[in-house]
Image (cartoon, rainbow, N blue to C red):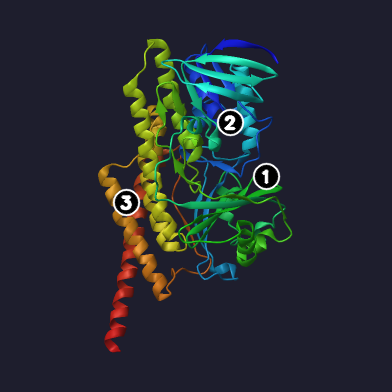
Amino acid sequence: MEPRQELNFELVIIGGGVSASFLCLDILKKDPSFKILVIENSIEFPQKIGESVVDMTALILEEKGIGHLLSSQTKKSGIRFLFNERNSEDRSDIAEFASPTFPGRINAYHLDRKRLDQDLLDEVEKKGVTVFRPAEIIFFERGNGSNKVHVSFLKNEFHITTPWVVDASGRSRVLSKLLHWKDLPIQLQTGSIMAHFKHIQPNEKWDTPENVFWDSNAIALRKFSTTHLMRPNSWWWIIRLDDITTSIGVMFDKQKIHFDSAEEYFRQLIEQDPELSRMTSGAVMSSIRHIEQVPYVSEKLVEQGVALIGDSGAFLDPLFSPGLELIGQQSLWLSDLLVQEKVKGRYNQRGWEKYASSFQKAYETRLLMYRYAYGLMGSYDLFTAWTKLGNFVYIGTVVYPSVVFKAKRKMPLRFSFMERLGVNVIGTRLNRIYEKRKKHGRVSVTKTNHLEYSGVRVPKDKRFVIIPFVLLFKAVRGYLSLERSELFSSLKSIQKRTKG
């Protein structure tokens, strides 16, 4: 090994994936001279399960100026939720709640993350970021306003001094482990099993009937949507990554669903589920991946000289694709703070505390929504009522303001005390209804080939103004309709007992 080399950088980022590149892009946009080192230990990025860009994420990516990198990715045509409460072999019994992506102010994509991660890293390297890859961290030492990172790269040892180290290593969570930061206790206990399938059956073999309206009006064909199969205490994703490969996986509530072997359980579910068995008939399945505990949140997101971004600090749930959105918002915050500190030459304690507090509250907000959602996933009308309320809150208070005011794009969704109270009341109520229905063997009452559209869209024309009000109307009507049907059911039950 050659003699060690001493280097200085204004920022060292551990990990070279999308979190690192987002942060580099945002910093260099504000200060092109910012001296950044990215340390990535892999020779090439792994193929990930499949990920989508929707709503806020699309806005954030647009601001980062990487549209030329997204043009090679598959356009996402929307989101679909399919319910088969009777586990029927008859496809006409499937009820669907759908959100086509219409042409408008936002473009959505299915992402080949392996390719995107590499394209982004190449992009920031062209902009002047130094990249060590493959490289290994030998030693890390925190100091008062100065960190020391010793790295092995190309048979050389580098001793690097830097005021800030940001962990963007994802679930590897390099700094959290080195600093012995613990995770917060959380109530959402979910696991996941997944695989890639090549050459799944065409949609007409397993899906609901052809949707001419969707394919004629959305930005892409229905088969390029993210399709969710909603099951009791669990949901499946079906993400077509390209014309050959499809990512299929299940997220489940570990407190309600138990098994001895993840691989056997996954294969068994696919064989026994009407849609999954038809879909995967004759397909070639990759190795199966099992994540025992999906969500986690670090007790700390920052201390002077050290910060976490993306999955290194927290991971929640991929149901509504919040991962890249939160990473994009974090990179906007972090870039502001790091560039300001370079200019002013001092640590902005209040600013960093606000960053940590904002995102801890954002994680708490989304975890609360997911915790109640898992108890409703097997029911069409209960889950859609919950989702409609969430659509109004998210689109009306987060997405729309961010379209109008760019400064709002860095602000994650956070509930106030009263909003949390409302979510707890409604979430508890809907879960009690579900348990009551399960006890009495009742399911949602839907028509043959039932299909409802969410109304979610971000148009360019004058309809932009009225969409939040449309979503509010749908949310209130959906919830009141649900309560009315439960009232009538209770009255019928009382009449039966009286006659008996």
Work out how far the residue at label 2 is from the one at label 3, CA to CA, in angstroms.
34 Å
Residue type (three-letter) at the residue carrying disc 2: Gly
Q: Is residue 222 left or right of residue 1?
A: left
Q: Residue at x 51, y 17 (%)?
A: 148
Res. 323 mark? none
Image vertical order of residue 129 relative to residue 183, above or below: above
Find residue 488 and report its horizontal and vertical position in percent: 31, 73
State the SS at label 1: loop
Res. 242 mark? 1
Find residue 88 and report its horizontal and vertical position in percent: 57, 71
> In the rendered image, which quarter is residue 461 located in?
top left
Let me know if residue 72 appears in the view.
no
Quarter the N terminus occupies: top right
Residue type (three-letter) at the residue carrying disc 3: Val
Q: Earlier in the sequence, mark 1 or mark 3?
A: 1
Let me know if residue 12 appears in the view.
yes
State the SS at label 3: helix
Labels 2, 3: front one: 2
Q: Which residue is mark 2?
A: 17
Find residue 442 and report its horizontal and vertical position in percent: 42, 73
* Of 213 and 454, the residue lying toward us: 454
Residues under numbered marks 2 and 3 in contact, where contact means CB atoms less than 8 Å apart = no
Find residue 246 and report its horizontal and vertical position in percent: 66, 49
Res. 423 mark? 3
Q: Earlier in the sequence, mark 2 or mark 1?
A: 2
